[in-house]
Amino acid sequence: MPKTAGIVIIGDEVLSGKVEECNAYYMAKGLRAKGIIVRRISVIPDEVPVIAGEVKKFAADYDIVFTSGGLGPTHDDVTIEGIAKGFGVHVVTEHSLHTFLYNRYGSKLTPERSKMAEVPEGATVISHEDIRFPLIKFKNIYILPGLPEFLRDKFDVIISYYNENPIALKKVYFNEYESELAPFINEVVSKNPDVKIGSYPVLNEESYMVYLTLESFDSSAVDRAVDMITQSKYRDKIVQIK
């Protein structure tokens, strides 16, 4: 069975529309490429009880959980507190993180900056040459920052350790209305139960009007579904296959 993942985006700024959310897309795309299935993405406020409940549920439901946001020195950075509360553990100062911060800030290491050394009790801290600040992992939860540049560096390091069975993917582009193709698409779906098929109409594109995605852990199943499409009466409507 493929591994499953859940993503929890934490931040009032996302829910209020002040910040455009891009971290979930980046992580979902990266996980998919590794053969890890994202089952749910949640966006929640900077509230300790909400974080506690949501992250604990995700950790129970999915093999891997990623949180984004709520790490830092300010009053609204409460992700660590929320996760600790959800699992009934204390928030503690992690020695190696504190040392890292002291080496960076020296006499300018304020109580606010020291807050960035706090972790849920029992967490693991991971250092890597490709990340600027150590990574925090608690149980099956990777606790990531909200700033996209920092998140991507850490996320890329994390998924480099996973080598699941990759998902085979092909895209078929049609110069035809989706409504015209719908009965045929349904037939392809029914005859290829091992292939996940998506249909996506496109506007303002001269060369094609809709494209299908065909995905499976079995590449031969994808090939069979594509063969069915290319041998159908709609073969002349196919613009390209990727």
Image (tube, rainbow, N blue to C red):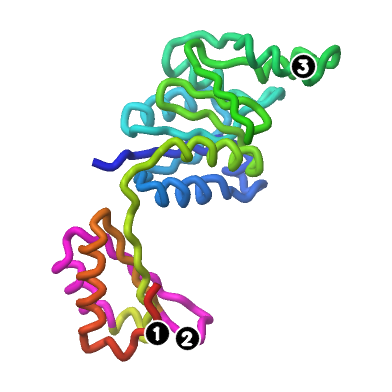
The local crowd at label 1, few if under 14, some if 14 to 19, many if 20 or more residues have their Cα within 10 Å, is: some
**Looking at the picture, which amino acid does disc 2 mark?**
Ser
Mark pair 1, 2: CA separation = 7 Å
| Magenta segment includes 203 | yes
The image position of residue 133, as x and y in percent, is: 66, 28
Q: Quadrant of residue 36?
A: top left
Q: Residue at x 63, y 31 (%)?
A: 129
Q: Nearer the viewer, residue 160 or 71?
A: 160
For the N terminus, the quadrant is top left
Instruction: Quote the CA–CA distance across marks 1 and 3.
Output: 58 Å
Residue 156 position in % (x across, y down): 54, 41
Circle 2 residue: 207
Residue type at mark 3?
A: Asn
Q: Indicate which disc, 1 or 2, sits on the residue closer to the N terminus.
A: 2
Q: Which residue is mark 3?
A: 103
> Which segment did they paint magenta?
181-209
